[in-house]
Amino acid sequence: MGWKRLAGVAVVSGLVLLTTTATATAVGVKGIGHNASERQSHAVPGSEWHGSYIYQDKQVWCVQYALPAPDSSVPYKEGDSLRTKAGKELAPDIAANISYLLLRYSTTKSPDEAAALAHLLHTWTSPVDGPVRLDTDDQKFLAYDSAFYASKLPASVMDTVARLKADAEANRGPWALSATAPKEPLIIGTESSWTVSLVKANGQGVPKAPINFTLVDATLVDGSVGGKVETGADGGPATIKIVPTGPKPSVAAVADSPADKPVVHQPIPTDNMQRMVTTGGEKKLNANATGQAKTAPGAVKITKIDSETKKAIAGVALKVTGKDQTSPAKKQDDSDLVGTDGKPIVLQTGADGTVEVPGLRTPQEICLVEVAAPKGYEEFFDPKAPPASCGTVAAGQTLALELVNKPNKPVVPSTIPAGQDGNTPVATASFDTQLRPGLMLAVGGLVLLGAALAGFLVWRRQ
């Protein structure tokens, strides 16, 4: 893409026309190019010249075919947009072709390229149109006979005409610059790939085009906040590896494009002289892309343990909430972490007594609140003030929490239940060893009565 190196020279050449003091250079001094082997009918001598002219020691290019060539003693001023000899504005694609070719070839040293450029300029700006025709002796209205000169110029020139025309149609402006942020979520501190593209008027990418850029809320991997990239050899987008450092990372890209219109200079005070045209040069294109970046997601892992045995407690229902222990916690995408009922999600501890909640927005204070007491721990559970454990989840980190449950008090039985421990129940008795006289007399009487009855029974049997 050598045209980029020529832009400065071409623009300076155009500006110097308006500011340089006139020298003694002769009128109509030819630069480089070719004479056609013949001159078209009704054209004045010199009209067979196809190439550049020298104006105040600078190489220039002219339109308004057949009028006198630039006079270095005549000042020129910047005029309106380039028009045809009939006074009509050029079609945008033709104007863009001319601007690009002047940018690319205005400093050429090749006679074939100079003659080809002049041929194209006259073909596009002096066609037959209304009062501009081929059969007039008035040079102001004499059309350029493109077909005639195509047969009178060297074949190498016409080959170059085809090449330059194809080059212009493939590469003319206006170009379009665009910048694109990644589609995937951006994480602060994590590298992401952004792209910048430079596309020509025909929809094809510009190959190996330099693009400058600056970054906001982001850096390159090396910490710098700007740099330069180049599009691919096939015109594909250039990739920029960006590390977001804030919530709104952005890239601002700048590239050069051929101007879509040439610059016209006209002689003063006369209009009976060819106009000089220079490239519109390069114009700056700007493009921006902005993304939304977040801190890396975090996670929380809670462990339920017995306060006395320190063993894990499985099957405990825990509600995941925000700091207030009522509202839902937030996921990385800022949505609420809720269950199917729309309320804060409830999870159960696994066999190891733990439960983990990943994908949480950071930083964020998280609480895990016990929903109901597990079996064997009901005595110390207060549903109005359930056990909870809270902490702040940091970017890319897992917050470890612990929630302790106190077991119920053991119940000690006052009697030994029947059949326990394999023993047969044994009744117990109590004895009173105190001697009381009345009781003793009653017992003695009963003894005597028993003896008498026993003696009576023995007598009866005998």
Image (cartoon, rainbow, N blue to C red):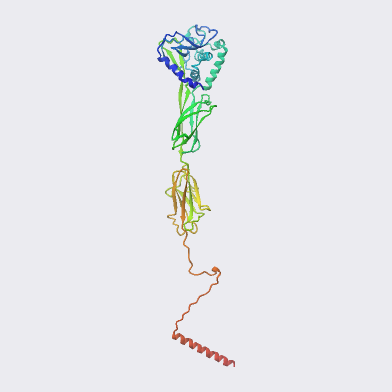
Residue 150, relative to residue 398: is it above or below?
Answer: above
Q: Nearer the viewer, residue 312 or 278?
A: 312
The x, y position of residue 49, in whole percent, is: 51, 9
Quadrant that contains the C terminus = bottom right
Residue 84, relative to residue 231: is it above or below?
Answer: above
The x, y position of residue 276, in whole percent, is: 45, 14
Total of numbered circles in the picture?
A: 0
Q: Name the residue rendered at 57%, 12% in the picture.
A: 155
From this viewpoint, is residue 80 visible? no
Q: Nearer the viewer, residue 236 or 274?
A: 236
Q: Name the residue rendered at 53%, 18% in the picture.
A: 164
Farthest residue to the right: give it.
462
Image position of 337 (left or right of 458): left
The x, y position of residue 40, in whole percent, is: 53, 8
From this viewpoint, is residue 191 visible? yes
Q: Name the residue rendered at 54%, 90% in the picture.
A: 453
The x, y position of residue 78, in whole percent, is: 42, 16
